[in-house]
Amino acid sequence: AQSVTQLGSHVSVSEGALVLLRCNYSSSVPPYLFWYVQYPNQGLQLLLKYTSAATLVKGINGFEAEFKKSETSFHLTKPSAHMSDAAEYFCAVNRPNSGYALNFGKGTSLLVTP
Amino acid sequence: GAGVSQSPSNKVTEKGKDVELRCDPISGHTALYWYRQSLGQGLEFLIYFQGNSAPDKSGLPSDRFSAERTGGSVSTLTIQRTQQEDSAVYLCASSQQGASYEQYFGPGTRLTVT
């Protein structure tokens, strides 16, 4: 089955530091991969998606992710953290044989300290 | 334009009662999804509707859960004989057809079963 694993349920970085949120996938077919963000008391918002085009994907708010088939990874990065980046981040992969519904990871809570 | 809307935003019900949760997708979106977000299980897929095709119900946790989509638009998720473990935030999303199309999420309905 298609699944994703997010390493680290909580990540803390200093403002201005590199943000790295890890996601590894398991898939029997070429996957479509997504990162969503959920700000406190808000709905889920798409950050970026990989759909078998360019392996380096750029998203909103300065985030990007690189699809690495050899490592089955799709880690999310941002060069310089901002206080407003504090949120819950979810990695997701398309479900097999279920149209385009998604299987989500457990989520990583990002804390940004001054 | 208007996003995905869900009602009610909060619902408190007694164990054993039935509840109905409503989702209004973005106009023109043919795909509609229900997910559940809970502390213990993270984000789980429940059911997926695509146009007039039979829905994918593979994520429904028990036969107490059902959903329908009328006229290819509004959807209702029904939980019969609610249990305390049904307490969660129920999220609805809609998208255009195709995996590369972004899923737009509603704000969710927080269900509390007492």
Image (spheres, grey):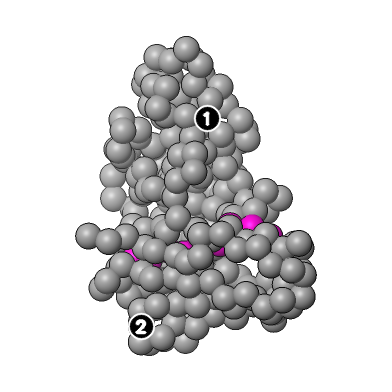
Residue for point 48% across, 72% down: B22
Which image quadrant: the N terminus of chain B?
A: bottom left
CA neighbours of label 1 inside 10 A, class few (<14), some (14 to 19), many (20+): many
- On residue B80, the disc is none
Q: What's the magenta bit mostly, secondary-structure-wise? A: strand
Q: Is residue B60 visible?
A: yes
Q: Is residue A29 visible?
A: no
Q: Which residues are magenta?
A: B87-95
Badge 1 amino acid: Leu
| Residue placed most toward the observer, A65 or A41 | A41
Q: Residue A39: horizontal and vertical position, in percent?
A: 45, 39
Q: Residue A22: horizontal and vertical position, in percent?
A: 53, 34
Residue for point 56% across, 59% down: B10
| Residue placed most toward the observer, A36 or B15 | B15
- On residue B72, the disc is 2
The number of discs equals 2
Q: Residue A106: horizontal and vertical position, in percent?
A: 61, 46
**Spatial distance from mark 1 to mark 2, Cα to Cα?**
38 Å
Which residue corresponds to mark 1? A110
**Is A1 included in the stretch rendered in magenta?**
no
**Is B94 included in the stretch rendered in magenta?**
yes
Tell me: residue A97, above or below residue A105.
Answer: below
From the viewer's perspective, tell me whether residue B99 is left or right of residue A42: left
Tell me: residue B12, above or below residue A45.
Answer: below
Badge 2 amino acid: Gly
Tell me: residue A60, above or below residue A13.
Answer: below
Secondary structure of the residue carrying tag 1 is strand
Secondary structure of the residue carrying tag 2 is loop
